[in-house]
Image (tube, rainbow, N blue to C red):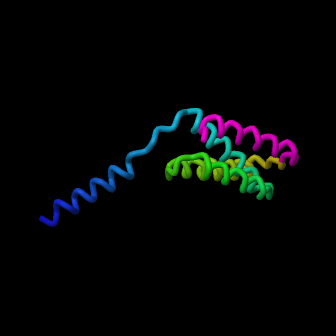
Amino acid sequence: MLMIPRILMLLSILFGVVRVEAASDDQLTAIRALGSLNGVALHCGRLDQTQRIKQALVLALPKQRQLGELFDYQTNKSFMAFINEKRTCPATDTFNQQVDMALDNLNAVYPR
């Protein structure tokens, strides 16, 4: 008798974890773009921009681990590519404009 409630609880947990809201290609692209910019911001010491990006994501995205993992993956990929390709940090104004545009795009695909 005790097994049935445990099995039901396990199934409800599994279905709760597996059930994820679908994200459109545009939404995923917006998250990836911000992850790429975040990697550059981390490498270049633009912590004000990393804070802006993360705050915008927290406010805009549904609370889904997979979306956060996508952002983290893209951040790491961008950070490592920046080092491996020996790129130089963009000008502050140029970079701020890139972040502004990416945040505008995020807000367009994830309206509040």
- Left or right: where does residue 5 sit relative to residue 19? left
Q: Which residues are magenta?
A: 90-112
Secondary structure of the magenta portion, mostly? helix
Residue visible at 51% across and 51% down in the picture: 63
Which residue in the rendered view is the most extreme toward the bottom? 2
Please tell me which residue lies in front, 62 or 32. Answer: 62
Residue visible at 56% across and 51% down in the picture: 68
Please tell me which residue lies in front, 29 or 48. Answer: 48
Which residue in the rendered view is the most extreme toward the front? 112
Image coordinates of residue 36 in percent, x first then y, are 68, 45
Displayed quadrant of residue 48: bottom right
Point out the image quarter for the C terminus. top right
Image coordinates of residue 108 in percent, x first then y, are 65, 35
Displayed quadrant of residue 45: bottom right
Magenta region includes residue 34? no
Image coordinates of residue 94 in percent, x first then y, are 85, 42
Count of marks, rendered view: 0
Point out the image quarter for the N terminus. bottom left
Magenta region includes residue 110? yes
Please tell me which residue lies in front, 39 or 87. Answer: 39
Residue visible at 28% across and 58% down in the picture: 10
- Left or right: where does residue 4 sit relative to residue 46? left
Residue visible at 38% across and 48% down in the picture: 18
Image coordinates of residue 90 in percent, x first then y, are 84, 46
Which residue in the rendered view is the most extreme toward the left? 1
- Left or right: where does residue 6 sit relative to residue 72? left
Displayed quadrant of residue 30: top right
